[in-house]
Image (cartoon, rainbow, N blue to C red):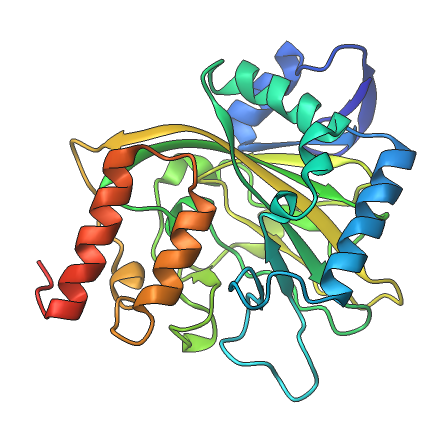
């Protein structure tokens, strides 16, 4: 069973694992929709236990999958926004959860029956010091030479409100195209980007959710998360579904991506890109590899 909330986060029951016409309309007009339940209490507790164990054992760190996505170097006071990319690589049970099954059905409904899970990751915002994710659009991370179609699911593993690091959205922002972004803190080696355009705070919609609830948004919807000032570690399990990207007839510019193409960051960024887009078209991988090899050889065409 899925219990759905509209863009203002008022819940109502929905018996099917799909979005209603009203909910689809909200996703289309606002760029996001919030569900008050997409998984079960028991499943959420088990997912949280798995992630706490993986992070405690620093699983994936040597492979570059575990890192602070807000800092290029670990801060003296420790990591404040910990990301583990593709946790399902280490615990395949995650791909068999009700969460993934329900998200898959909705992605097929919204995007296409041909859409599939392209990558998953967990974000931990430690209690008291967890850093909120800056305003951004997911497409800012994607190759501008391709047309993309993705849908992201964000499920908290504990109740979240503004003090816990919940999500917030700017309704209708997905209709504005891809906005200019920049490296967070001006650090081009940090993973995160932030929108360089001012976001009208009076228009944002904050979405508190119970554990096992879910916020769904498209690739161009401006979104952020608040700092975790609570006494509880905030975990969120994120899934991104997509259709294989195709070469764009009108490729856009993304100078914030160009600024990261340096010799010292080549292999790290290439590894992360492949991990994030493991289901993308073969032609896309060739473009990534060729472009970064050109950087090494000094050819920036």
Image position, residue 77 (x, y; %): 70, 85
Residue 197 found in image quarter: bottom left
Q: Is residue 60 above or below residue 94?
A: below
Residue in view at x 67 percent, y 37 percent:
215
In-front residue for pair 65/227: 65
Residue in view at x 24 percent, y 52 percent:
289
Image position, residue 74 (x, y; %): 59, 81
In-front residue for pair 175/41: 41
List the single residue furthest toward the bottom: 76
- Side of 22 where 146 appears, left or right: left
Instruction: Look at the image and tell me whether residue 252 can be seen.
Output: no
In-front residue for pair 24/105: 105
- Side of 2 where 181 appears, left or right: left
Image position, residue 115 (x, y; %): 47, 22
The quadrant the N terminus occupies is: top right
Instruction: Look at the image and tell me whether residue 150 can be seen.
Output: yes
Q: How many numbered tags mark residues here?
A: 0
Q: Is residue 292 above or below residue 146?
A: below
Residue in view at x 85 percent, y 51 percent:
49
Residue 83 found in image quarter: bottom right
Residue in view at x 82 percent, y 62 percent:
233
Q: Is residue 274 above or below residue 130?
A: above
The quadrant the C terminus occupies is: bottom left
- Side of 82 where 164 appears, left or right: right
Q: Is residue 239 above or below residue 22?
A: below
Image position, residue 3 (x, y; %): 81, 22
């Amino acid at each position: 069973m899925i219990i759905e909330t509209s863009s203002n986060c008022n819940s109502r029951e929905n018996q099917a694992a799909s979005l209603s016409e009203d909910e689809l309309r909200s996703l289309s007009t606002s760029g996001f929709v919030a569900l008050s339940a997409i998984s079960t209490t028991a499943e959420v507790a088990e997912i949280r236990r798995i992630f706490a164990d993986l992070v405690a054992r620093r699983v994936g760190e040597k492979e570059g999958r575990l890192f602070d996505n807000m800092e290029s170097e670990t801060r003296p006071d420790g990591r404040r926004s910990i990301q583990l990319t593709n946790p399902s690589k280490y615990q395949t049970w995650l791909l068999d959860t009700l969460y993934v099954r329900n998200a898959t059905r909705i992605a097929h409904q919204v995007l296409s029956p041909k859409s599939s899970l392209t990558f998953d990751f967990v974000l931990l915002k430690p209690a008291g010091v967890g850093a909120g994710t800056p305003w951004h659009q997911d497409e800012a991370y994607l190759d501008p030479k391709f047309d993309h179609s993705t849908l992201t699911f964000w499920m908290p593993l504990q109740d979240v409100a503004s003090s816990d690091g919940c999500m917030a959205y700017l309704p209708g922002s997905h209709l504005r195209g891809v906005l200019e972004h920049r490296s967070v803190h001006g650090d081009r080696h940090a993973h995160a980007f932030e929108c360089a355009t001012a976001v009208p705070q009076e228009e944002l919609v904050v979405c508190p959710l119970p554990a096992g609830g879910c916020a769904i948004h498209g690739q161009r919807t401006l979104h952020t998360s608040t700092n975790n000032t609570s006494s509880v570690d905030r975990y969120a399990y994120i899934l991104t579904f997509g259709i294989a990207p195709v070469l764009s007839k009108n490729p856009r510019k993304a100078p914030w991506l160009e600024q990261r193409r340096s010799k010292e960051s080549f292999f790290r960024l290439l590894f992360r890109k492949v991990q994030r887009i493991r289901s993308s078209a073969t032609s896309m991988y060739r473009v990534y590899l060729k472009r970064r090899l050109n950087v090494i050889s000094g050819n920036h065409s």
